[in-house]
Image (cartoon, grey):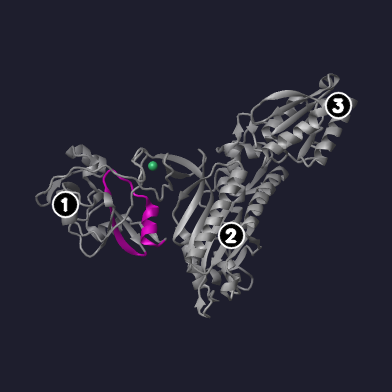
């Protein structure tokens, strides 16, 4: 490729709307343009990276026996109705009506559609199967942002496994786990596998692959011992709190103006870990009282996962007053009967606590949780905090912001059952196959690499992803010697299978150097009349900034070796 003919519209300045580094640099370096919020046009340089990402994924998927498909993006609503997810997906799903009045949706994921194909797997002899595709997904994000990191339209590699039984699923899941580790390693991305919530997919287990980045929106908890979990799932050990062996009966006391735990701490002088925080949620249209220790915060996803429905929301104030007879600030569960009360285990066995009395501006003291509150379920609900002891080893855990690169799920039989997939087993008995599902966002991987690999001068791609591995920057392309030698090196590197771009533009050297750095090409060869007069060209490495002179006669071999060593 000759830069003079390439469409790489680099910008002198950062785009004003972009905050995340990948967003800013991918626009500025001429990789993409925004069409509307959450939808980007990928330009040719980005397509080259995307192609390399897809090649790596494809090779590793094929290596574990994956077979490539391409299923439609537009689906009949009935299929999603049959699985039960048409309503569940809510506003995140794009829905439309065709000219005949049929309801169709745009695919957010393809469990249902792959399952329709799986109905032809009639015998156990056809199992296991591992099927995948690269396909566009649509998700109506409420707040698309950070460029390619959170969009409404993107390419996903999604794969699905079908096995006869749980042990088969475990093996398929493990194969994907290993393939994903290799995929991210080949991309140069340090992806941490973490225990994750199954969320909208349903199922029995899931692992996310997370890359540490300030541009990320997911928090993970990790420990030096290897413990790693998404904050939505993370737990920690809590130091025991000494309580009196016995407390007198509960006693109301006035708390005028107290609205928060902090207010109550100030009024009573007792610490927040001696209080019960009472929240009211509505799950599937029924109220649920949610209790936590006063100094703990609710991790809503844990509640959603624990209850097992996506239809969970905080109750409105009027609903709370109708249910408990008081406003938020004075709520409690003491003496509340006939309601679902879910409490965090940090409250189990605790005595001498305070809680709202369900009367405005009144609280109760002397609460003995086991004695006074009719807890219907104990459920880990709290959000862990940095520094709390690791559940595995006791060392302090750390919390990090991350980008989710991949997610693998043990789905179970929810889709095969609801969409009627059965196979005959060895004894001729009908069995419902068990599924796994596995995803990697392709453009998100590209943006994540940009987050990880950049500096103040621009992007600095790892060799495996770089749109071009080498740029030949010609100083004075009009000079016969410089022009001729650069053409020769360009032809020989191309012949050797190197991705090379020849910067033959009639621009000042400074502009060309700046563009090569901004675009992030790993190796730059500077070919000019002055160096050639001494028989040398300059070789610069983008990642380290190192420069050295190489004899003209050796340059092709040296560059080929360098590129191969880093691919
Ligand atoms: Zn640990």
Residue under numbered circle 1? 368
The answer for how far apart the CA atoms under marks 3 and 1 are is 86 Å
Residue 239 magenta-highlighted: no
User: Dot 3: what SS?
Assistant: helix
Q: Read off the magenta span.
A: 284-309
Name the image quarter holding residue 311.
bottom left
Residue 139 numbered mark, or none? none
Q: Is mark 2 within 8 Å of ligand 1?
A: no
Q: Nearer the viewer, residue 442 or 8?
A: 442
Which residue in the protein does label 2 denote? Answer: 159
Q: Position of residue 545 (x, y in %)?
A: 66, 26
Residue in the foreground of this view, choosing between 314 and 241: 241
For the question of whether residue 428 can be seen, the reply is yes
Residue 479 visible in the shown view = no
Q: CA distance from mark 1 to mark 2?
A: 51 Å
* Residue 461 percent coordinates (x, y): 65, 37
Quadrant assignment for ligand 1: top left
Specify the farthest residue to the bottom.
428
Name the residue that disc number 3 marks: 482
Q: Residue furthest left?
A: 248
- N-terminal of the pair, mark 3 or mark 1, is 1
């Amino acid at each position: 490729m000759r830069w003079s003919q390439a469409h790489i519209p680099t910008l002198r300045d950062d785009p004003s709307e972009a905050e995340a580094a990948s967003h800013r640099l991918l626009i500025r370096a001429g990789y993409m343009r925004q069409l509307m919020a959450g939808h980007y046009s990928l330009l040719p340089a980005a397509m080259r990276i995307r192609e390399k990402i897809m090649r790596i994924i494809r090779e590793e998927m094929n290596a574990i026996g994956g077979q490539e498909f391409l299923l439609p993006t537009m689906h009949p609503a009935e299929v999603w109705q049959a699985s039960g997810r048409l309503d569940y997906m809510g506003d995140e799903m794009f829905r439309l009506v065709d000219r005949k009045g049929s309801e169709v949706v745009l695919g957010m994921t393809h469990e249902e559609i792959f399952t329709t194909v799986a109905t032809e797997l009639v015998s156990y002899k056809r199992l296991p199967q591992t099927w995948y595709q690269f396909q566009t997904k649509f998700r109506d994000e409420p707040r698309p942002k950070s460029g390619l990191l959170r969009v409404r339209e993107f390419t996903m590699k999604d794969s699905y496994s079908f096995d006869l039984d749980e042990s088969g699923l475990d093996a398929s899941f493990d194969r994907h786990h290993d393939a994903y580790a290799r995929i991210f390693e080949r991309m140069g991305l340090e992806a941490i596998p973490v225990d994750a919530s199954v969320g909208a997919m349903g199922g029995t287990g899931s692992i996310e692959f997370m890359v540490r980045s300030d541009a990320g929106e997911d928090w993970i908890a990790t420990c030096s011992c290897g413990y790693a979990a998404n904050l939505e799932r993370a737990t920690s050990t809590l130091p025991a709190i000494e309580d009196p062996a016995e407390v007198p009966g509960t006693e109301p006391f006035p708390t005028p103006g107290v609205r928060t735990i902090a207010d109550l701490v100030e009024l009573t002088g007792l610490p927040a870990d001696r209080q019960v925080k009472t929240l009211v949620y509505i799950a599937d249209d029924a109220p649920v009282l949610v209790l936590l220790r006063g100094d703990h915060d609710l991790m809503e996803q844990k509640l959603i996962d624990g209850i097992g429905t996506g239809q969970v929301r905080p109750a409105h104030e009027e609903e709370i007053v109708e249910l408990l007879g008081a406003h938020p600030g004075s709520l409690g569960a003491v003496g509340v009967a006939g309601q679902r009360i879910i409490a965090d285990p940090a409250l189990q066995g605790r005595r001498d606590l305070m809680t709202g009395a369900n009367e405005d501006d009144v609280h109760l003291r002397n609460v003995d949780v086991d004695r006074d509150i009719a807890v219907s379920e104990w459920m880990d609900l709290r959000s862990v905090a940095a520094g709390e002891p690791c559940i595995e080893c006791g060392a302090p855990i750390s919390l990090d912001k991350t980008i989710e690169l991949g997610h693998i799920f043990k789905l179970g039989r929810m889709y095969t059952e609801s969409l009627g997939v059965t196979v005959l087993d060895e004894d001729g008995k009908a069995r419902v196959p068990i599924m796994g599902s596995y995803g990697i966002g392709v453009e998100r991987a590209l943006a994540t690499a940009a987050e990880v690999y950049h500096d103040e001068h621009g992007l600095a791609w790892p060799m495996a992803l770089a749109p071009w591995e080498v740029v030949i920057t010609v100083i004075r392309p009009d000079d016969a010697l410089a022009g001729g030698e650069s053409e020769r090196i360009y032809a020989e590197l191309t012949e050797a299978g190197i991705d090379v771009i020849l910067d033959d533009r009639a621009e000042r050297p400074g502009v060309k150097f700046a563009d090569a750095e901004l675009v992030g090409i790993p190796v730059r060869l500077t070919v000019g009349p002055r160096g050639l007069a001494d028989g040398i060209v300059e070789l610069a490495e983008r990642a380290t900034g190192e420069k050295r002179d190489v004899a003209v006669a050796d340059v092709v071999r040296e560059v080929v070796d360098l590129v191969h060593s880093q691919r």
